[in-house]
Amino acid sequence: MTFYRLPLLVHYSNDLSGTGDSVVVVVVVVVVVVVELVVVVAVVVVVVVVVVVVVVVVVVAAAVVVVVVVVVVVVVVVVLTAAAALQQ
């Protein structure tokens, strides 16, 4: 990614002969390196956001499952208790 351009940058920064070409190359290499770093940071941020969203969705789904199970258990207990009371 970025690191293979660093020797090129060092080479041209040591070879500023006054023609102006080396300065342009250094500026271009620096701009490309900065753009690549920004893209990498953006990708990392997107990946982190996606992971956080997936974790939140999984936690919410698990909470919904727990609530449904508790409601079903309560309903079953109430129905069985009412049936036992009616049989007496």
Image (cartoon, rainbow, N blue to C red):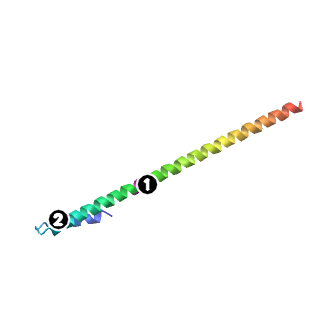
Vertical comparison of 68 with 8: above or below? above
Residue 11 in percent (x, y) is at: 18, 66
Inter-mark Cα distance, 2 to 1? 34 Å
14 displayed left or right of 61: left
Which stretch is magenta? 43-48
Task: Locate the N terminus and report the quarter of the image it occupies.
Answer: bottom left
Badge number at residue 23: 2
The quarter holding residue 33 reads: bottom left
Q: Residue at x 51, y 50 (%)?
A: 53
Q: Residue furthest right?
A: 88
**Labelled disc at residue 79:** none
Q: Earlier in the sequence, mark 2 or mark 1?
A: 2
Instruction: Determine if the magenta segment contains residue 46.
Output: yes
**Residue 46, disc:** 1
State the predominant SS element of the stretch in magenta.
Answer: helix
Q: Is mark 2 on a helix, strand or loop?
A: helix
Position of residue 19 in the picture relative to residue 50 (left or right) = left
SS of the residue under disc 1:
helix
Measuring from the top left, give residue 12's x and y in whole percent: 18, 66
Residue at the image point whose x is 17% and y is 67% from the top:
22
Residue 63 vs residue 52: left or right? right
Q: Position of residue 79 (x, y in %)?
A: 80, 37
Q: On the rendered image, what quadrant is the C terminus found in? A: top right
Q: Which of 23 and 81 is in front in this view?
A: 23
Task: Give the residue type that dot 1 points to.
Answer: Val
In magenta stretch: residue 53: no
The residue positioned 43% from the left and 54% from the top of the image is 46
Other-residue count near label 1 (Cα within 10 Å), few / some / many at <14 / 14–19 / ≥20: few
Quarter of the image where one finds residue 68:
top right
Residue 48 place in picture, x, y as percent: 44, 52
Look at the picture and state if 47 lies above or below 76. Answer: below
Q: Which amino acid does label 2 sit on?
A: Val
